[in-house]
Amino acid sequence: MATRDCKFLIIGGGPAGLTSAINAASEGLSPVLIDSGPRVGGQARQSSLIENYAGFPEGISGPDLLDRFCRQAAKFATRVQCPAKARTLRIDGARKIITTDDEEFAAKTVLLSIGLSYMRLKAPGMLELLGKGLEYGAPLIDPTTYGKSRICIVGGANSAGQAAMHFSQNPDAHVHLIARSPLEDKMSQYLVDRIRGCANITVHEGAEVSEVHGTEKLTGVSLKFKDGAASSLDADNMFIFIGAAPKVDWLNGTVGMDAKHFILTGPKLVDTNHWPITRQPYPFETTVPGVFACGDVRLGSVKRVAAAAGEGSAVVPIIHEYLRHE
């Protein structure tokens, strides 16, 4: 297997990884970015309309925003490889060795911006109907394509809210938004206000999907409420946004994590007995010196596109500082 030396390897091409690549490449760090997907962009590509990202007063879709990130990274000659799935991380002195299926990277510094993967809904009928009107995430196509339809959106955070608003643009559709808790708990207020004011969205709060129905295609959804009540909905399509978990299985415990597998970073590592050397850890630095983490995978991060992009930018001068002193 060929080994490629690099100064700065970025694993994961979502908003954090791409923003870090743009800033690092523009400052001469010659980053290499690898991503396991067919295209870089991460889950942000699933957002139908992002309205609170600075610079886009009319809002911008996730695919359009990430395409702009990609063009800017290309402008500064960032080397991007995808699909290229990281399989292992091991430490060899000052080098961090990362292997993919095809090659090996020996990096001086590494950024883990690997994001999250969709959590699976556990209810009878799910496996049989997956791909038959039932999907995780949602395809960003013209909502009128669905015609006169009954669409269920499952989830209570921004991704679910954006999907509900997207499908509500189809005047012939009725959207059911199913959330375990009040929308205000996890969703941006501007989205909550729009959803509650939308005539063709019905919100079911305090509800969980207890079963899905259909043979060749989804036809209905059963709900169970916190107060013990139950109801059923006719449904032609269901799109699920029930949260996500860090994509860290391949790390095999190389870096410190909390009980939910979010990566530990920064100066507080000293208080956890996970920090192995005498100097203080840098912001975003993991329990392995020279390995950093940004974006949704990091414990304590704000799960928003703009926040991830901000972290990706902020880590670049810290990478410079690390390289100057190591």
Image: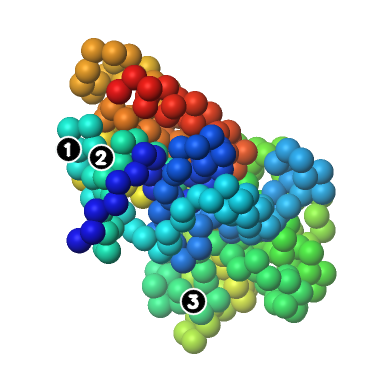
Q: Position of residue 73 (x, y in %)?
A: 57, 49
Q: Left or right: where does residue 292 sit relative to residue 196?
A: left
The residue type indicated by label 1 comes to Asp
Kind of residue indicated by mark 3: Gly
In terms of secondary structure, where does tag 1 sit? strand
Residue topped by disc 2: 96
Could you say whether the residue bearing mark 2 is in a helix, strand or loop?
A: strand
**Extreme-bottom residue of the structure:** 216
Q: Is residue 91 left or right of residue 209?
A: left
- Mark 1 neighbour density, 10 Å: few (under 14) some (14–19) many (20 or more): few
The residue drawn where x is 57% and y is 68% is 238
Q: Mark 1 — residue?
A: 92
Residue 77, percent across and down?
53, 51
- Residue 176 seen by the camera: yes
Mark 2 neighbour density, 10 Å: few (under 14) some (14–19) many (20 or more): many
Q: Tell me which residue sits at (56%, 39%) in the image.
A: 26
Name the quadrant containing residue 56: top right
Q: Residues within 10 Å of mark 3 (few under 14, many from 20)?
A: some
Quarter of the image for the N terminus: give it.
bottom left
The residue under label 2 is which amino acid type? Lys
Residue assigned mark 3: 131
